[in-house]
Image (cartoon, rainbow, N blue to C red):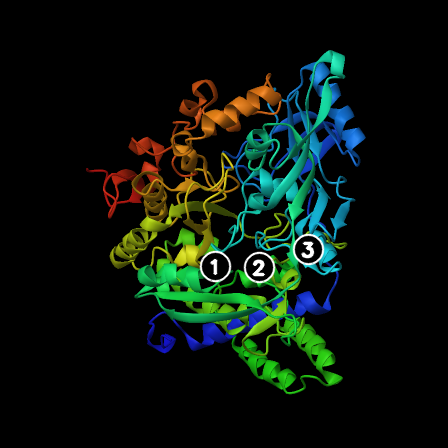
Amino acid sequence: MRDERSWPWVLPEAAAAAAALVLVLALACQFDTTEGVSVPTVTCSSGNEGCSVTNYLREFPDRSQCRAAAVVYPSTEQELVAAVAQAVRNGQKMRVVSKGSHSIPKLVCPGGNGTGLIISTRDYDQNIVVDRAAQTATLDAGVRLKPFVDTVAGYGLAFPHLPYWAGLSISGVLATGAHGSGLWGKGSGVYEYVTAMRLVVPASAAEGYAKVISLVAGQDDELLNAARVSLGVLGVVSTITLQLQPQFKRSITFVQKSDSDLESQILPNAWHNEFGDILWQPALKLAVYRLDNRVSLGTFGRGTNNFTGFQAQSSALIAANRISAHTLKLQSVMLDYLSCLSRLGTAAEADCYARLSEEVLDRLQKPDHVVGDMTEEEAEALQSGEQKCVQLAAVHSAMVATAFGYTSNGLLFTGYPIVGYQNSLQTSGPCDDATLPTFVCPWDRRTKSSYYLQTTFSVPLAKVAAFIVDVKSMVALRPSALCGPGLYLGVLMRYVKKSSGAFLGELEDAVDVDFTYYRSLDPKTPRLDEDVMEEIEQMLLFKYKARPHWAKNRNVAFATTPSLYPDLPRFLRAMKQLDPDRLFSNEFTDAVLDVDGAASTLQKFAPFCALDGLCICSEDIHCAPASGYFCRPGLVYKEARVCRKVKSSRR
């Protein structure tokens, strides 16, 4: 393992402070249940009319507002049919939104210039019907992931793969092709385990304007393969039936290494680990390998996935977690933590952690303990890449030291391996189902919270080594440029297997690379090192012909989508069959599916358009020339056109 003391950006004081902060976040989550309910994604001016809808970040990539005439909250299939029938009768556009609306693109906005209908699955989450003999579960569309896996565990069953965030609804997962990580068996795509589905679709007047259709694997494969990943344009999902497996345990160990041989190790990691992934920090030249496999049910361990980033946190702590610099007295928290460890297994253990949490909260609220601070906004304003690297080294060290929030026994991490039941380890959260506003999700916009963009693509397995080499070349030219994305966990690399038939699923075995990075609150203000992430994005898009994640990404990431899916014509035929008037489509879905040539409308060329990914710059005005950012070729991928800060406007 790399000796981090040799890395020039690691400061012992910063590392200790960051480690303390991570510990406090975990402790606060364990001992304080006063979490805050997130702001609803649908708000209305008069009852359920005059509404607006947004995503969990409260901002679409184009920063526009989405208006709708009304929202409905069906709780039964009959109510769902009635809502669709009324809209069809009126020729009204419709879109479905889940409780949390965890898609960044503008998927949930109904068309119709404010006259559309929002159908929320918030209340459509009551039924999880388990057939123990058939090893299946049939779920209402709004059921979220954690209740699902915990319910089937009660029957001695498990589901093999899910996304890492537990706050997603099952219908939202399928609509966007969400997945876990793994190439074994059927792979990590949730859509691969669908055996049946019921949809509510438009119908003729004689049929009552809406009807329920049932799709069963082996009988209705053409339509089912369209519905497995549908972007919500086929109709409203009512129920989904998923294939389960007997309950099992997993054994997880995180191993940190130099990234010097990452390009040669990324594939062996997939073959040797059923649920493996890699967390890559290019700026630190480090990679954290997740060694993750099944073990027998008799293996000792009750580990849990309490990933720190998905836990409800005090709004004060969220603000404190954004402070970069070291707080001297917080270093003593590490000694307090070790003291609590010495009480492991005794009656005094819980009291020790409760006191520690309260003590550190008290320290954080006293400003005289802060030697110096710099928020990410301040680092951006000062163009301080080195400051972000100082933050990154400290925070990453702390996250690794605390196993990213995973616990050995439901309370704290005591060492590897972490062994636990599948339902306890496969997904984490949610943090948005709470009762008091003081504890909220880290991205809750009521606090000074994370505000970010994501670039997420599936890179074909045969090309991922070359992509890694290209990113390393970028780091060699601009050593601090990827410290910013590193603060948002780094590059999460998950394995996704070729789909057995989903028209909009994975076309070949791939590695999903996930970058998260700072977004400016001002649409006219460029990001520090903006050009590097833009070049990586275009490299993925054009050089490697990678496929964008349907639920993430800026608009430009979908510029080539229609050419990437050879079965797109079959999908569009299914869409025309089920929704001939395209009542469930909107401007964004038309563009990414190139309906009637709409792909040409995806990029919106205007001043500053490249800053938020609304266009790929072709002129300086698309960047921010007044701030010194001009449209320039890429550094490694020369064909890219990116907004780079230069000393003059001369080409």
Residue nearer the viewer, 329 or 570: 570
Look at the numbered discs 1 and 2 and tell me whether their residues touch, using CB distance below 8 Å: yes
On the image, the x and y values in percent for residue 28 come to: 67, 67
Amino acid marked by disc 2:
Gly
Is tag 1's residue or tag 2's residue first in the polypeptide sequence? 2
CA gap, disc 3 to disc 1?
A: 26 Å
Q: Residue at x 49, y 58 (%)?
A: 375
Amino acid marked by disc 1:
Leu
Count neighbours of disc 3 (C-alpha within 10 A) and say few if under 14, some if 14 to 19, many if 20 or more.
Answer: many
Residue 389 got which mark? none
On the image, the x and y values in percent for residue 299 come to: 62, 75
On the image, the x and y values in percent for residue 573 come to: 52, 22
CA gap, disc 1 to disc 2?
A: 9 Å
On the image, the x and y values in percent for residue 595 come to: 48, 21
Check the image and report above or below for 532 versus 490: above
Residue topped by disc 2: 309
Q: Nearer the viewer, mark 2 or mark 3?
A: 3
Look at the numbered discs 3 and 1 and tell me whether their residues touch, using CB distance below 8 Å: no
Residue 489 got which mark? 1
Is tag 3's residue or tag 1's residue first in the polypeptide sequence? 3
Q: Nearer the viewer, mark 3 or mark 1?
A: 3
When asked about the image quadrant of residue 121, the answer is top right
Residue topped by disc 3: 149
